[in-house]
C-alpha cells in the first residue's frame, strides 16, 4: 500500500482545476480574500483547506437554492 502525502498548498492553476473554475475567477476570489493564499516569490500558493471549506460552503448554498426552488414549485410560485 502506497501512502500519498496530502498537499497543503496548490498553485492557482491547480486550485482552478480542483474547483472546476477559470483561473481568473480563482484570482478574483483570492483578491477578495474568499480563499486564503500566500505569495512565495512571484508564485501565489492557495491553501488547500481554504479550497475545501469554500467547496463545502458552495455545495450547501447550491443545495439550499435547490430546496427553495422545489418548495416554490410545490406552492405554485415558480414554474420551469
Image: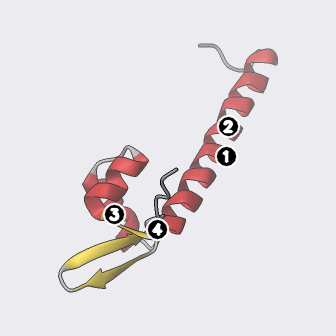
What label sits on residue 78 in the rendered view?
Answer: none
Is 23 on the left-hand or right-hand side of 8?
Answer: left
Q: Which residue is mark 1?
A: 60
Q: Which residue is mark 4?
A: 35
Seen at 61% across and 39% down, the residue is 62
Closer to the camera in the image, 20 or 72: 20
What label sits on residue 63 in the rendered view?
Answer: 2
Seen at 82% across and 18% down, the residue is 75
- The span from disc 1 to disc 2 (Cα, nearest Å) is 5 Å
The number of discs equals 4
Compare marks 1 and 4 and give the one earlier in the sequence.
4
Mark 1 vs 2: CB contact within 8 A: yes
Compare marks 3 and 4 and give the one earlier in the sequence.
3
Q: Quadrant of residue 64?
A: top right
Give the secondary structure at mark 3: helix
- The span from disc 3 to disc 4 (Cα, nearest Å) is 9 Å
Compare marks 2 and 4 and give the one earlier in the sequence.
4
What label sits on residue 28 in the rendered view?
Answer: 3
Where does the image place residue 53, in percent across and percent down from the top left?
A: 59, 61
Where does the image place residue 66, in percent across and percent down from the top left?
A: 67, 30
- The span from disc 3 to disc 1 (Cα, nearest Å) is 21 Å
Where does the image place residue 77, in percent across and percent down from the top left?
A: 73, 20
At label 1, counting other C-alpha atoms closer than 10 Å, the crowd grade (few under 14, some 14-19, many 20 or more) is: few
Residue at the extreme front of the image, as rendered? 1
Its colouring scheme is: secondary structure
Is 50 on the left-hand or right-hand side of 13?
Answer: right
Q: As displayed, is residue 70 above or below residue 17? A: above
Amino acid at each position: 500500500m502506497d501512502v500519498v502525502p496530502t498537499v497543503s498548498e496548490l498553485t492557482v492553476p491547480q486550485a482552478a482545476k480542483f474547483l472546476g473554475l477559470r483561473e481568473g475567477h480563482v484570482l478574483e476570489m483570492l483578491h477578495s480574500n474568499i480563499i486564503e493564499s500566500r505569495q512565495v516569490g512571484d508564485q501565489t500558493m492557495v491553501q488547500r483547506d481554504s479550497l475545501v471549506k469554500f467547496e463545502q460552503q458552495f455545495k450547501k448554498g447550491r443545495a439550499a437554492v435547490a430546496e427553495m426552488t422545489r418548495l416554490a414549485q410545490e406552492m405554485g410560485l415558480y414554474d420551469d
